[in-house]
Image: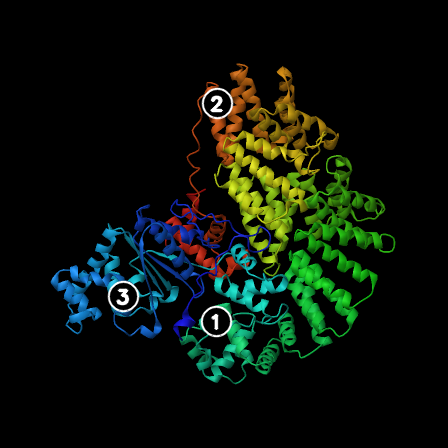
Amino acid sequence: MTDQQNDEVSDVTTAPAGAGSGGLHRPSEISGAGRPQVPGEQSLLGRDAEWARIAELVGSAVGTGRGSSVLVVTGEPGAGKTSLLDRAADRAAAGGALVLRARGSESEHGIGLAGLHQLLRPLLSGAGRLPESQRRAVRGAFGIGAGAGEPVDPLHLRVGVSTLVGDAAARRPLLLVVDDLQWLDLGSLDLLAFIARRLDGEAAALLAAAREETVPLRFDRDFPQVTAGPLDRASAGLLLDAQPVPPCGRARSRILQEAAGNPLALVELSRALAHGRVESGGGRALPLTKRLENLFAADLPDLPADTRRALLLAAATDTGELSDVVGAAGGLDCLGALEPAERAGLVRIQDGLLRLRHPLVRSAIYGAASFTERRSAHLALAGALVHEPDRRAWHLAAAATGPDAEVADALAASAERARSRGGHAAAAAALERAADLTPDPELRCQRLLAAARSAMFGGHPQWVGELTARVPGYTDRPDLRAQAGVFSGWALGLTLRHDAALETLLAVAEQHVAALPDAALSALGIAATSAFASGDPFHRAELRRLAERLADLPEPNSQAWIAAATAPHTGRARALELLAAAKAAMGEDDLSALTVLGGTAWCMDETALAVELLGRALDHLRRAGTAGTNATVSQAIALAQYESGAWTAARNSTEDTLWMAAEAGAELSAIGTRILQATLDARQGDPAARERAEAAVRGVDLRRSLALQVRHRVALSIAATAAGDHAEAYRQVRALFTRDIRPRPVHYHASLYYLGDLAAAAVHADEVADARAVFESVQPDLGDDRSPRLHAIVERAAALLAEGEDAERHFRAALADPAGAGWPFERALVQLDHAEWLRRRRRSAEARPLFGAALETFRRLDAGPWRDRAAAELRAAGAEVPAADAGAAQEPLTPQERRIAELAAQGLTNRDIAARLYLSPRTVGYHLRKVFAKLGIRARAQLRDALGGLA
């Protein structure tokens, strides 16, 4: 292997500003040791924790922080270690430090002190200032001048190079950066370790990087390490979006799966796809670029033929069972054949399992074989799997040389079994491949549509779009083309193309409303989602017009959602009636009904029911390891959890939603979720909330989705309120309503829930007259049969905008219905406002219980700015503020880490946890290492007690 082949990409985790698909990038928010980002410095996707450790080290070198003077960054090839080192070097140089760099080289591994000479060469001219014994040793060791060739005293050499480093650091802060530490020669490693142990107290630091399996012994145990593990799924998706040609659809999912969070692999496979070297459809493994082959399978060509044959069987099988490979190998001695591969580190055999080192090793092995060799391997495996029809069908499909009705039927049967288990993504993949092998055009079309339906339930809009685009080429049947239009419209809506989605779906409904009413109603049901998100009144009117012609159809789910989405306030009674009828008719595990009715319940402020139904839908999706994901469902439950006061659960759901959306290319869910995260941050007083809210929509035209526009404005308004900027808070919340003579809601549903916030901001910003005009103008939009939630919000607004003593009856009305407790933060706002009104009228005794109740809610939700305000008001009312619960200690784990830790504490293995959370076992192990470090424990047996201390 050459040094060039060993180079890791230095910028694969970098997301340039403005790249990727609308607003899906991560903002440049990494601040390390509290320092601002250096101009021109780029943020690294998914590396916040690693960079925080490195920034602390850099701070210790340049004098802006305090911490360890040595840090070793570990990770697999392509993990982006060099990117982190480059960024650290830039940060240190910008801070005025001298940065010295070296890189280990396999070709110089045997040359004594080659690495240290590369690192310290700029300092060697200062050897003349060293004491005589040290000067001779340094010059002799590095072949300088007259000292070349003289005997070298090891101790004097160590002290001499350490003195050179110390003197340099005394003149100017110093950062030593060493990449590919594992290839440094032994002499350099010894001296570097000697220097590293003596950096404490100096304005100097050492940052090194090594492959995690080959960290030199001198640095493996004695110095702190940080692991650049696999990127999480959300960051991996964002990295794909940052590529010049972002992959989408089925190819996107395959790249995410094969790359397993490796940044270099994500970039290289995306480039290969863009240049047509990767197929977007089926296939057992992705062909690798030369660069990836060099990193992950450079030893493959030198292995014996029998070893390569056994490896090909291992790469072709879809499990890690050694028995599968042995069963398919015929007379080959598999264990003996695999020994060279195990010695080369390509595979590991243990407990009957055969594990390839990385999914890309599998791809390299598979790609290196000819089609004939691959076909023979699949046929051999199919012959060994006669009692496992699903796996046998896939191997026969991989060996097919053209259309094959028998194999296609077997795959279709496999898809039906997967679907019955809830495995929608697996069913879609099987049906897509079955369609490819189906000779009859009409049956092929039907299988493509069935695949699209399963992909839709799995939450993969771009894949659905790819599948439906193929249908018109195979059939002229109106019913099949109508189905394709429905699925295509659904996919368009989830990628923020609401106008195109509505144009497609309303056209299908108009065309088929008489001849194919069921298809027309299905189109309208999906169109209602885009109509709700866009907020466009024309499309909503068209939707209602067509729905009236289908009102007698016995399909309660779509009817309920259409009613709720088009007239949630003014048609509330009818929508609730349809929701109740649909819920009564719903099957126990009807995913479609659970999803549609969960969304309907949320829209109608039946929030507890929404959490229940959407939670059941997610459980249904998660029950099978092949179930796929659905970012739409996950985002919907996150919103319902937030509104119902389950903020921790909402944060957990947003984390899940982001990786689901990134993997599936569900742009609408990704943007909405980032807005919700920023809203939560703002409610809890995070000063970075405003920037996160802006970053969530950067590059997005929010005129295409008025619902998102409203939610974005709300996040900014809350952030301004938390910061005490009431004028800005009013400006943002006022933008939820038009500037007409008679103002109207910008979004017919979402805007009206912020009338209370409008009134509160108006009071502080001296805009009461303007807010009162808005409040009076929107009364017709509120309807007569208001939900308890909306009723409380409207009464709060009326109280804040009222003159004189009239406010009290509105405050009391806002708190009168016990059902209002279902939205605890909003109820606490009313309690706080009412109590402040009472205190200003010297009725402190009446105010104190209200202040206390509001304070308790704000504390439970960790709503810092409102908690502090309630506490101050309670003191002003003459009461003692009760101490906060001492059990509310800091939560050191991320939601993902805590979830993994809890499962591990229950006794689940990494493999079990991976299957439960749709992660790789490697990723689970990476997170557990971080959990152990944060909790200060060393064994799984300690997890239960450690987590109990955080409860």
Looking at the rendered image, the disc whose residue lies closer to the viewer, 3 or 2, is 3
Q: Give the Cα separation between the discs numbered 2 and 1.
A: 65 Å
**Residue 350 image offset from top left, x and y in percent:** 44, 70
- Eyeballing the image, is 878 above or below 781? above
- Give the secondary structure at mark 2: helix
Relative depth, front residue between 603 and 665:
665
Quadrant where the image shows the C terminus: top left
- Give the secondary structure at mark 1: helix
Q: Give the Cα separation between the discs numbered 3 and 2.
A: 65 Å
777 left or right of 374 in image:
right
Task: Name which residue lies at 61% across and 27% down.
Answer: 759
The residue that disc 1 covers is 291
- Give the secondary structure at mark 3: helix
| Rendering colour mode | rainbow
**Residue 732 image offset from top left, x and y in percent:** 59, 35
The residue that disc 3 covers is 116
Relative depth, front residue between 178 and 170:
170
Q: Is residue 112 visible?
A: yes
905 left or right of 397 in image:
left
408 left or right of 720 in image:
right
Category of crowding for the residue at label 3, using alpha-carbon neighbours closer than 10 angstroms: few (below 14), some (14–19), many (at least 20): many
- Eyeballing the image, is 949 above or below 408? above
